[in-house]
């Protein structure tokens, strides 16, 4: 799985958009970008994933650059409940060596404040 | 729809004791996984299952055993608990090629 780089922490004002960057310069052509988050003391929560087109769901939007070397997760109207560690993971979907494991790095601690 | 449910939520064991962690999912997912998460670290895969009656080793399987007798349940056993197994344990499930859904974890302390 390609390595990802994320800033260790970010702050965002409640009601504003939170834009979380992720660099994955060694991504392969068949690797997807996944985003999960982990709110304190809870299990990781899937947010969104994509291959090369921008994606949007009820939680967030995912913007992937044309060269696919970086992406941005956008929470359009952040709330206090969005305070969490956000993980960007790049991998091939389905089972490969290692049994479909998700490799979580250290992620970005997003703090949403009033 | 409960999703992925883990029991117990907390447990304290003495070294050498045994216990079983239960994971149950009601989403009819084929694949189930057990991870552990240590402070300041990411999740590491212990064991996984691709269907009822099957199990396979992940990256840190030593000291653990698993069973998948029913599609909806995935059990993680510690035969002789050691302090190094103090951790938060997460269970997850998924359909093939789909994102994994996680439970809220079991916090296990071994004294």
Image (tube, coloured by chain):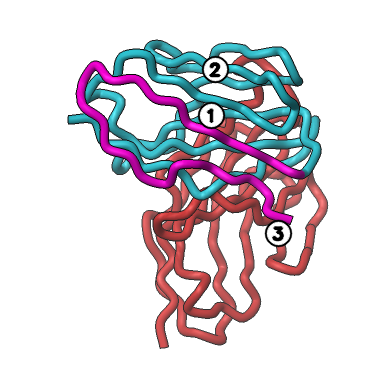
Is A85 positioned to the left or the right of A64 in the image? left
- Say if A14 sits above or below B82 in the image: below
> Of helix, strand and loop, which one carries label 2?
strand
Q: Nearer the viewer, mark 3 or mark 1?
A: 1
Q: Chain of mark 2?
A: B
Q: In the figure, the red chain has which letter?
A: A
Image quarter in which the C terminus of chain B is found = top left
Q: Chain of mark 3?
A: A
Mark 1, Cα crowd under 10 Å, few <14 / some 14-19 / many 20+, is many
Dot 1: chain letter = B
Q: Which residue does the numbered mark 2 point to in the structure image?
A: B66
Task: Pick the residue in front: B90 or A17.
Answer: B90
Instruction: Tell me, yes or no, whether dots 2 and 3 are on the same chain.
Output: no
* Residue name at image x 54 percent, y 57 percent: A21
- The residue segment tinted magenta is B1-26
Q: Residue at x 75, y 20 (%)?
A: B51
**What's the mark number on residue B34?**
1
Question: Residue B64 location in percent, x, y?
Answer: 43, 16
Q: CA distance from mark 3 to mark 1?
A: 28 Å
């Amino acid at each position: 799985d390609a390595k990802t780089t994320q800033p260790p922490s970010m702050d965002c004002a409640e009601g504003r958009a939170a834009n979380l960057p992720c660099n994955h310069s060694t991504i392969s052509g068949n690797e997807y970008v996944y985003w999960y988050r982990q709110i304190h003391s809870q299990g990781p929560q899937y947010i969104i994933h994509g291959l090369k087109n921008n994606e949007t769901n009820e939680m967030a939007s995912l913007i992937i650059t044309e060269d696919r070397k970086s992406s941005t997760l956008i929470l359009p109207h952040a709330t206090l409940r969005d305070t969490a560690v956000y993980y960007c993971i790049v991998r091939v979907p389905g089972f490969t060596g290692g049994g479909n494991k998700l490799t979580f790095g250290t992620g970005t601690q997003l703090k949403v404040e009033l | 729809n409960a999703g992925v449910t883990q029991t117990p939520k907390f447990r304290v064991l003495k070294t050498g004791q045994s216990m079983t962690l239960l994971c149950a999912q009601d989403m009819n997912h084929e694949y189930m996984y057990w991870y552990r998460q240590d402070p300041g670290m990411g999740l590491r895969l212990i064991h996984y299952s691709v269907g009822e009656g099957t199990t396979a080793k992940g990256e840190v399987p030593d000291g653990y055993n698993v069973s998948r007798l029913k599609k909806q349940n995935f059990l993680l056993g510690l035969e002789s608990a050691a302090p190094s197994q103090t951790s938060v344990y997460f269970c997850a499930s998924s359909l093939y090629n789909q994102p994994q859904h996680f439970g809220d974890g079991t916090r296990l302390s071994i004294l």
